[in-house]
Amino acid sequence: MTATSAAGSLAGRTATVTGGASGIGAACARELAARGAHVTVADLDGPAAKALADEVGGTAWEVDLADTDALADHVLDTDILVNNAGVQRVSPLEEFAVADFRLITRLMLESPFLLIRSALPGMYRRGWGRVINLSSVHGLVASPYKGAYVAAKHGLEGLSKVTALEGGPHGVTSNCVNPGYVRTPLVERQIADQARVHGIPESEVLAKVLLTESAIKRLVEPSEVAGVVAYLAGDEAGMVTGASWVIDGGWSAR
C-alpha cells in the first residue's frame, strides 16, 4: 500500500498523535501526514512538536499529558487519535518509587482514557473514527522490574477493547499496536537501568535482556510501527477493531 493509493489515503482526515515529537510518535506523524491527514503533534517538548508540525504541515500542541486534571474538560476534535506518549522506569517492585508508579499510570492509562472520552463525541457525530493505542508486547506478557509499565499497558488493552465495543455502532474502531523493543530514545535510556538491575554490563543488555525472547534478533524500527498505525487509520481497516497487532519478532509466540 503506497501513500498515494486510494485505499490508503487519509486526505481530509485529522489526526492527533501524543508523544508525537520523537520516536514512534514522530514516525506515526510523518506517515499519517504522508497519507494526507492533517496531523496535530502533541508533546511535552513544545519546540520539538512545532518543528515536526512545521515539517509535515500540521499543528503543534504543547501539553503535559501527565497533568490529567487539566485534561478532564479538554475538548479534542479529531478523526484519528494515536495514544503514544509514555515513559519508562526499571526497578524491583519493593524499590519502585510510588511517585513513578503514579506518573506512569497517569500518563499511559488515565490520559488515554481522558483523550478517548474527549474525542468520541465528535467521532460519533461524524460516524467515523479511529482510536489507535500504542501498547506493547508488555500489554500481553510481563517482564521483571517493569511493574508500572506492564500494569499500564495491560490496562490500556482493556480500555481499547471497551472503546471498540462502544464505538462499533458509531463507525469508530479501536485497536492496540504491540511492538517489542523499538529503536527509540525511550529504549536507549533504559539500558543503564537494565544493566543495573540484571547485574550485567551495558554492552550486554541488548543481547541478554532486550532481544532474548525475540526470534528475530533486532530492534523494531519506528517506521515499521508507523506502517501498522497508518493501516489501522485507513478505511480498509474498517472491520478491524478490538484487536492487538503484535510487532515483536516472535517474542509473544513463546
Image (cartoon, helix red, strand yellow):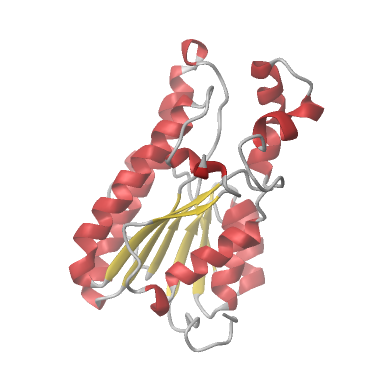
Residue in view at x 55 percent, y 87 percent: 5
- Can you say which quadrant of the picture contains the N terminus? bottom right
User: Taking 101 as reference, is 1 left or right?
Assistant: right
Camera-side residue: 210 or 66? Answer: 210
Residue lying farthest to the bottom in this orientation: 6
How many labels were placed on the picture? 0
Q: Position of residue 144 (x, y in %)?
A: 53, 23
Q: Quadrant of residue 29?
A: bottom right
Vertically, is 140 above or below 76? above
Q: Is residue 66 visible?
A: no
Camera-side residue: 144 or 151? Answer: 144
Q: Position of residue 19 (x, y in %)?
A: 54, 51
Residue lying farthest to the top in this orientation: 94
Q: Is residue 232 visible?
A: yes
Vertically, is 82 above or below 85? below
Vertically, is 244 above or below 107? below
Residue in view at x 55 percent, y 47 percent: 44
Q: Position of residue 54 (x, y in %)?
A: 64, 69
Camera-side residue: 209 or 63? Answer: 209
Residue in view at x 36 percent, y 46 percent: 157
User: Taking 225 as reference, is 210 left or right?
Assistant: right
Residue in view at x 45 percent, y 22 percent: 99
Residue lying farthest to the front in this orientation: 254
Q: Quadrant of residue 118?
A: bottom left
Q: Position of residue 104 (x, y in %)?
A: 45, 33
Camera-side residue: 119 or 96? Answer: 96
Q: Quadrant of residue 2?
A: bottom right
Vertically, is 87 above or below 95? below
